[in-house]
Image (tube, rainbow, N blue to C red):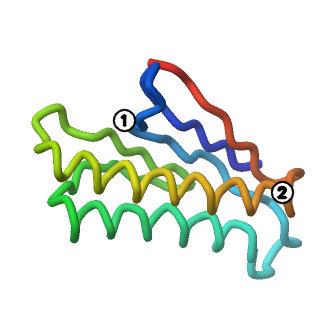
Amino acid sequence: MTRAVINRLKNGDIIGFSIRGHAGAAKDGEFDMVCAAISAVGYTALGGLQELCGVNAYKESDGNLEMKLPKDMTAEAWTKAQIILKTMVIGLKQIENQYSKHIQVSFKEV
């Protein structure tokens, strides 16, 4: 199962996320569409952060993707980042609604 944890402030602003584990929706040797969908949503958010906000702060390893926004962002970049990250959450929640046995989205106040 993939676990996506969204780190956010008390005001609801998202400051980072971690997506860990493989969805395990496909049989061995078959293409895992759920895992691919989760990856597509996560990497699209990272691409948006880089292209629109100048943020390129993430770590990845096999089955793991983590990102934390830098503290020195401009107000304009922060606002754009919130739109991107909140859209990412919408995408992940939509996948969870269809494939709840393979992805769990949760929130952590930090």
- Depicted 6 relative to depicted 53: above or below: above
- Depicted 2 relative to depicted 91: above or below: above
Residue 50 rendering spot, x and y as whole percentages: 23, 64
Q: Nearer the viewer, residue 34 or 75?
A: 75
| Tags 2 and 1 touching, CB below 8 Å | no
Using the rendered view, name the quadrant where residue 37 is placed.
bottom right
Q: Nearer the viewer, residue 18 or 50?
A: 50
Q: Is residue 43 left or right of residue 50?
A: right
Q: Secondary structure at mark 2?
A: helix
Which of the marked residues, 2 or 1, is nearer the chain's N terminus?
Answer: 1
> Which part of the image, by quadrant, shows the C terminus?
top left
What residue would you read off at disc 1? 15
Residue 64 rendering spot, x and y as whole percentages: 51, 49
Amino acid under label 2? Asn
Q: Nearer the viewer, residue 68 or 89?
A: 89
What residue would you read off at disc 2? 97
Residue 102 rendering spot, x and y as whole percentages: 82, 54
Q: At 86% from the left edge and 52% from the top edge, which residue is drawn?
A: 100
Using the rendered view, name the quadrant where residue 46 is placed.
bottom left
Q: Is residue 1 left or right of residue 87?
A: right
